Amino acid sequence: MRGFRRKQAIEELTMKKILLVNGPNLRLLGRREPEIYGHDTLADIVDACRECAGELGFELVDFQSDSEGELISCIGEAPLKDIAGIIINPAGYTHTSVALHDALLAADLPAVEVHLSNIFKREDFRHTSITGSACIGVVAGFGKESYVLAVRALAARLQ
Ligand code: CA2
């Protein structure tokens, strides 16, 4: 490998990694409840985040699960996988999961919580985020743009 390709490969190897974690049912995005969550699919959102992260010099790794245990394991493994920071939409677990909150604290990495919808304009049970206090900040209410804003905010913290 020579010249430009070698430089590109070295840059990719040394790029800091951002982990994007999506919780339960977010794989259904774009197919149901577009009036609340918009028309973008999860793949569209991940692509937009990856593009934004790349422009800012970060590699984006993504993970989605409906299982609280799998989400906790993924966050727990992040420091061992050389992840520099986390963006998470815990979805329904936002409002219920002390275990995810504890996993985020234990990982000890800067994390940003993200929501497509404005959780404060919705049912009372969505007004509380258990996981939010384990994060450096929360972005909510801007659809796909919430995620892109979260990438920008986390990248600024990591630079
Ligand atoms: O606004 C958000 O991003 C939420 O995290 C989405 C969660 C909800 O429980 C939170 O209160 C706010 C729901 C994710 C489920 O996504 C669906 C997508 C399409 C159809 C049905 C559910």
Image (cartoon, helix red, strand yellow):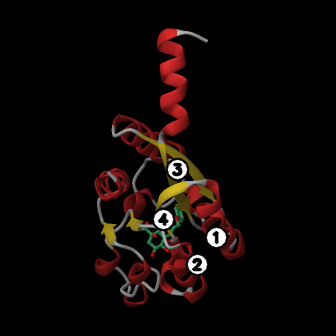
* Mark 3 crowdedness (10 Å alpha carbons): few <14, some 14-19, many ≥20: some
In front of the other: 52 or 146: 52
Q: Residues within 10 Å of mark 2 (few under 14, many from 20)?
A: many
Distance Cα–Cα, label 2 vs label 4:
12 Å
State the image coordinates of residue 77 (x, y, percent, origin top left): 66, 64
| Quarter assignment of residue 74 | bottom right
Q: Earlier in the sequence, mark 2 or mark 4?
A: 4
Question: Which comes before the other along the chain, label 1 or label 2?
Answer: 1
Q: What residue type is labelled 3?
A: Leu
Of the image marks 4 and 1, the number of the one nearer the N terminus: 1
> Which residue is rendered at x = 39% and y = 88% of the image?
128
Disc 2: which residue: 103
Q: Do the residues labelled 1 and 2 touch (CB within 8 Å)?
A: yes
- Tag in front: 3 or 1: 1
**Mark linked to residue 42:** 3
Cα distance in 3D space between marks 4 and 3: 13 Å
> Which is closer to the viewer, label 4 or label 3?
4
Left or right of 56? Residue 134 is right
| Residue type, mark 1 in image | Gly
Residue 86, horizontal then vertical, whole percent? 48, 61
